[in-house]
Amino acid sequence: MIYKSLIFKSLLSVILLSLSLSAFAEISLDSGKNLFKTKCATCHNKGMKAASTGPALGGVVERWSDYPESDLYAWIRNSAALISTGHPRANEIFNEYDKSAMTAFPELTDDDVASLLAYIDGVYTGVYPPRKAGDVGADSGATAKQGLGAWVYWLLLGVLGLFAFILSRVIGNLNYLAAEKEGRPYQKKTIFETLTNKSVVSFILFGLVVLGAYTAASNAINLGRQQGYAPDQPIKFSHATHAGEHKIDCQYCHDGARRSKHAVIPATNTCINCHSAIKYGSTYGNAELTKIYASTGYLPKGTGTYIEGYEDMSLEEKKEIYTGWMLENAIENDEKFEKVTEDLLEKIDQEWGEVVVSLTNDQKSTLGGPIEWTRVHNLPDHVYFNHAQHVTVGGLECQDCHGAVEEMDVVAQYAPLSMGWCINCHRETKVQFTNNDYYNKSYEKYHAEIASGARDGVTVEDIGGLECQKCHY
Ligand code: HEC
Ligand code: HEC
Ligand code: HEC
Ligand code: HEC
Ligand code: HEC
Ligand code: HEC
């Protein structure tokens, strides 16, 4: 009966391990991020490195490492309760922050708090959000799972290894029992013998070689590249709304594209051209549009004014002006709100919190100044790329290189931006001579050849588009 109990034991351990695996999967950086945004971001800086109303949360687990982990959990659920027990760390930080109260969150489960702490640590150490080639699309759900992914794979590998080991022991025991029954001698293998078995060793070696080659190759190919990169932006600006639904021309905002090297990200004034009139959004109400105004001190009340002395105002003064206006704006524009209620006040307080979080960062603790959009496309410094050359002279569409931006809520990098990508297009694309007369004169030889039927067109390659120094400084 030895083998029955062995089989039972190995099955049990596999089941237990997979159970713990699924429990593990409940903790996700992504849900941590959502929780942080909705519950903590009004008081704690989202960069995790600078203090705001509450302290910077980066490294908080270490600061609490003298106490059981459950103390930190208890703090996050109800800090006042922990302070009243006389807990040293709780009282220290409470006094350091002039006894300001942190909101209680009794509704948070253990998994919620673990997700929050994992997210805080991820942002602090720079591993979240992961910037990986291939995570196409704006859905940050996909990206957060990758952070966890590596862990899960290692764990699975461990489980499989353990399983293989247990099975080999089971087989060994079965062989032993069979031999005993038939009365033939059988030398039971020791653990060491099983592990150093020739086929086990060669299998492990083979696995390592394949894994090594795969990682080396994919790292080399993707070095510095990030096709599909779609970072969150400080304002939920949607190209699908502006360039798609409302058909605003790309060059209304990116007016550099036709005349200069850079396409240029529009200044806030360009936004205000329209949003001095469109001041309450159909999707986010006050929340997103107020960021535009608060970044420049524009108050869209009545005919609209720039607030005098805005730069020197304190955050509190700015808050008073804008939350007051947001209240009027909501009542005026949203039929859901007829008068000032507790709920509305709370909603506006929360929205203001989001404005502050989006417009400040480690370097900037107060509002004001240009909106800091996160750059999506980025060629290395040694490459020269010029928009006007391609858009005006080459007659290319934005979409040839950027994909269907007019359908994107969050811009994602569509092309690989590799050297091969530039070169391929230069090999295949015919030059449009009609666009520039002066330029055309220098290629009379080609015109003659086309006229005589000796060639059917001139590619960018023919005019020198593959020469190294054209693209490299
Ligand atoms: C209303 C503002 C506010 C909100 C919302 C808030 N906190 Fe706090 N938090 C504080 C303040 C202020 C402190 C400093 C201690 C004190 O004065 O109570 C603090 C301290 C902490 C500490 C202790 C830091 C240390 O170094 O010991 C942790 C951890 C913490 N907060 C986590 C969170 C988490 C997680 C959330 C969201 C679930 C959150 N806080 C939401 C204001 C807030
Ligand atoms: C109303 C103004 C507006 C219009 C119209 C507009 N954009 Fe944009 N565009 C922006 C802003 C603001 C950003 C920066 C925020 C972001 O990345 O979403 C941006 C970012 C981009 C980026 C990414 C830049 C980077 O960081 O690498 C590309 C590419 C782009 N736009 C292409 C287009 C194309 C193509 C169109 C037309 C189909 C278009 N845009 C229309 C305002 C506009
Ligand atoms: C040519 C006019 C125009 C310009 C310029 C413009 N927008 Fe808009 N924007 C619109 C229209 C129209 C809407 C749709 C309003 C709605 O659905 O309520 C909109 C909606 C939005 C929304 C969504 C609001 C919501 O809650 O639904 C945001 C955010 C926004 N714009 C940001 C910007 C930013 C940032 C800029 C400058 C880079 C900008 N817009 C420039 C016309 C414009
Ligand atoms: C031939 C390919 C190509 C075409 C066509 C093209 N772009 Fe780009 N675009 C790029 C590349 C490559 C970059 C990255 C440039 C860098 O990092 O220096 C870029 C960057 C951008 C940026 C980021 C800011 C900047 O200027 O670096 C914006 C915005 C942008 N493009 C908008 C547009 C718009 C709008 C059009 C159409 C009018 C357009 N692009 C046409 C290849 C193209
Ligand atoms: C979608 C096609 C396409 C892509 C992708 C593309 N180009 Fe071009 N490129 C053109 C065309 C077409 C011209 C010719 C414009 C003209 O008529 O002078 C051109 C011209 C050029 C020139 C001027 C060449 C000369 O001999 O005058 C440079 C430099 C250049 N491209 C750099 C780049 C770089 C760098 C990249 C990649 C980051 C790139 N291009 C990607 C289509 C492309
Ligand atoms: C049409 C434009 C273009 C031409 C022509 C071109 N390159 Fe590049 N090259 C690029 C771009 C874009 C990159 C950046 C690729 C990346 O970031 O992955 C690059 C990168 C490189 C790198 C760095 C390695 C890397 O992958 O980042 C080297 C080295 C290089 N090029 C050499 C050359 C040489 C040598 C020539 C002439 C035979 C040449 N290039 C011609 C566009 C060009």
Image (cartoon, rainbow, N blue to C red):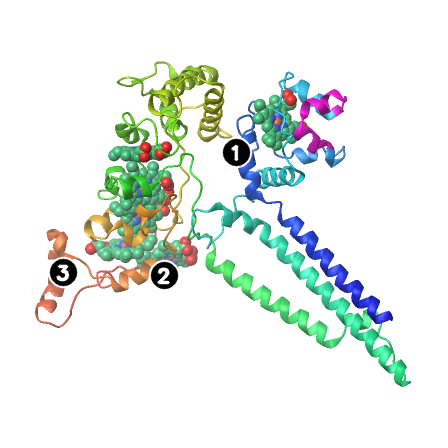
The CA span between labels 3 and 1 is 59 Å
Question: In the picture provided, is 30 more to the left or to the right than 425?
Answer: right
User: Is residue 338 something that shows in the picture?
Assistant: yes
Q: Position of residue 302 (x, y in %)?
A: 28, 17
Secondary structure mainly formed by the magenta segment: helix
Q: Nearer the viewer, residue 377 or 299?
A: 299
**Quick check: marks 3 and 2 in contact, CB under 8 Å?**
no
Q: Quadrant of residue 107?
A: top right
Residue at 46% x, 47% y: name it: 139
Magenta part of the chain = 71-88
Residue at 53% x, 32% y: name it: 38
The CA span between labels 3 and 2 is 26 Å
What element does badge 3 sit on?
loop
Q: Is residue 37 magenta?
A: no
Name the quadrant of the N terminus. Answer: bottom right
The CA span between labels 2 and 1 is 40 Å
Give me the disc on residue 37.
1
Location of mark 2 (residue): 420
At label 3, the amino acid type is Tyr
Location of mark 3 (residue): 443
User: Is residue 466 something that shows in the picture?
Assistant: no
At label 1, the amino acid type is Lys
The 10 Å Cα crowd at callout 3, few under 14, some 14 to 19, many 20 or more, is: few
Q: Is residue 74 magenta?
A: yes
At label 2, the amino acid type is Gly
What element does badge 2 sit on?
helix
Mark sitting earlier along the chain (3/1): 1
Residue at 82% x, 67% y: name it: 6
